Amino acid sequence: MQVINNSRPEYMPRLEHLLYGNNYSVSIDLYGPLDGNRPLIEVLKSAVSSSCEVPRSVLISVDEARAHILESLLYPGDPAAGPIDLPAKRSEVTALVEQLLEGAHVNKADAIYTFHLAKGHPGYPVWWEFALDIHAQGRRWILLGCSSD
């Protein structure tokens, strides 16, 4: 499938491109701003997939969210699967992650919940994944990321 019109901010496909590797790819999705007052599952079924299931959601700090996203996106892999030449790309990846965090309003968040998307994930999680429900300035953003083979 060829994407004709990609309306995502340019830092997202750039991150995915930089992190592409041997038997390894990264998928990042950001939804928002969304209604911060609706239940998470309703928002996910409307914005992500009608088949979404979320068995648990846990409140985390901004620092924990930042660390989890950065640790995931800087996952080095192993000789069989992982990003190609990640050490040489690390500074650009880190700078792009900062843009991602800004776009998802992580640094301005009043509350951030990590959750497990048991069904309905737009990617195919294999090595790592993150799913965050970010509440900031009366609105909500859903940030999903995963690595796959």
Image (tube, rainbow, N blue to C red):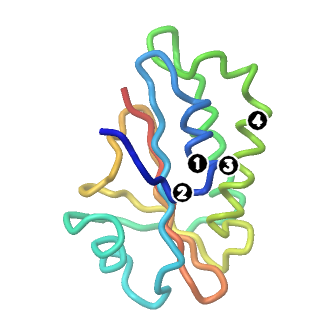
Q: Earlier in the sequence, mark 4 or mark 1?
A: 1
Q: Is there CB contact under 8 Å for labels 2 and 4?
A: no
Name the image quarter holding the C terminus. Answer: top left
Depth check, mark 2 against mark 3: the one in front is 2
Name the image quarter holding the N terminus. Answer: top left
Image location of residue 116, percent across then percent down = 37, 57
Out of 147 and 56, give the one closest to the viewer.
147
Report, in whole angstroms, how far the alpha carbon at label 4 lies from the one at label 1: 12 Å
**Labelled disc at residue 12:** 1
How many discs mark residues in the rendered view?
4
User: Where is residue 119, by image quadrant?
Assistant: bottom left
Q: Amino acid at mark 2?
A: Arg
Image location of residue 122, percent across then percent down = 33, 52
Q: Earlier in the sequence, mark 2 or mark 4?
A: 2
Where is 104 relative to 146, above or below? below
Report, in whole angstroms, how far the alpha carbon at label 2 lies from the one at label 1: 7 Å
Q: Tell me which residue sits at (19%, 64%) in the image.
A: 51
Depth check, mark 2 against mark 4: the one in front is 2
Q: Is there CB contact under 8 Å for labels 1 and 3?
A: no
Q: Which residue, given by chain and number where applicable, does mark 4 sit on?
A: 92
Q: Which residue, given by chain and number where applicable, does mark 2 sit on?
A: 8
Out of 139 and 58, give the one closest to the viewer.
139
Q: Amino acid at mark 3?
A: Ala
Q: In the visual, does 38 lie left or right of 140?
A: left
